[in-house]
Amino acid sequence: MKAPFGVFSILGNHDYGDYMHWESPEAKLANLEKLKSIHAQMNWHLLLDENFPIEKGGASIGLIGVQNISGKSRFHSYGNLEKAMEGAEKYPFTILMSHDPSHWDKEVITHYSQIDLTLSGHTHGMQFGVEIPGFRWSAAQYLYKHWAGLYMAKNQKLYVNRGYGFIGFPGRVGILPEITVIELV
């Protein structure tokens, strides 16, 4: 992947190796460090509770990335949004990359009104549902208030991408894979 301002990434819940048995805590940590080094080898800028300026034509936006933070008790939270926001007040527009959309309700819209747009994923739309003009349903909506598409609260927006892979069931029914293009003007 190539992008004119760089490729940026964050970690999601599966990246920490919490769902498998490890021989030791050191083996689990080594796996995470290997994953981080793969991001670097691919020239992806892995944002670990930090912000990064993107500038063009004298204008700038702040790209903020956190490690996984969840508003759901069954998922571990590793990130620190307060740390990631340090110095971000200088940006006139901010975009937060946060894997789990439940983080938006848990912390973003309640404590960080200066975040303009949050980009999330995580739900995969549960890989099953119906999406036709005027009607959208997935079992994901019973677990996640924000499970796919664009949501708004006051002046803040959240976009939840449906993903293009799968977890568990190796397929999708009615919830198509998604790569989102957002044009900022």
Image: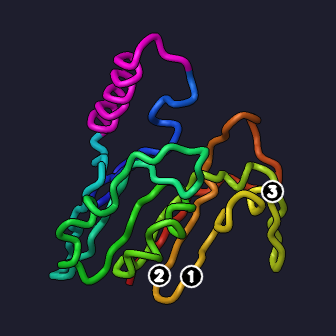
Amino acid, disc 2: Gln
Q: Residue at x 48, y 71 (%)?
A: 182
Mark 1: amino acid: Met
The kind of secondary structure the magenta stretch mainly shows is helix
The local crowd at label 3, few if under 14, some if 14 to 19, many if 20 or more residues have their Cα within 10 Å, is some
Mark closest to the chain's N terminus, 3 or 2? 3
Closer-to-camera residue (15/174):
15
Q: Residue furthest front?
A: 73
Query: Where does residue 3 sit, x and y in percent of width and height?
Result: 33, 57
- Which residue is more in the foreground, 6 or 69? 69
Determine the residue positioned at 18% across, 78% down: 90
Residue 152's disc number: 1
Horizontal relation, residue 18 to residue 65: left or right: right
Mark 2 crowdedness (10 Å alpha carbons): few <14, some 14-19, many ≥20: some
Q: Residue furthest bottom?
A: 154
Is residue 177 shown above or below 32? Answer: below
What range of the chain is rendered magenta? 21-42
Whether tag 2 and tag 1 are in contact, CB under 8 A, the answer is yes
How was this image coloured?
Answer: rainbow
In which quadrant of the rendered view does residue 32 lie? top left
Q: CA distance from mark 1 to mark 3?
A: 21 Å
- Please give the residue where the numbered disc 3 appears in the rendered image: 139
Residue type beneath disc 3 = Ala
Q: CA distance from mark 2 to mark 1?
A: 6 Å
Q: Mark 1: which secondary structure?
A: strand
Residue at the disc numbered 2? 156
Q: Residues within 10 Å of mark 1 (few under 14, many from 20)?
A: few
Q: Is residue 148 left or right of residue 43?
A: right
Q: CA distance from mark 3 to mark 2?
A: 25 Å
Q: Does dot 2 land on a helix, a strand or a loop?
A: strand
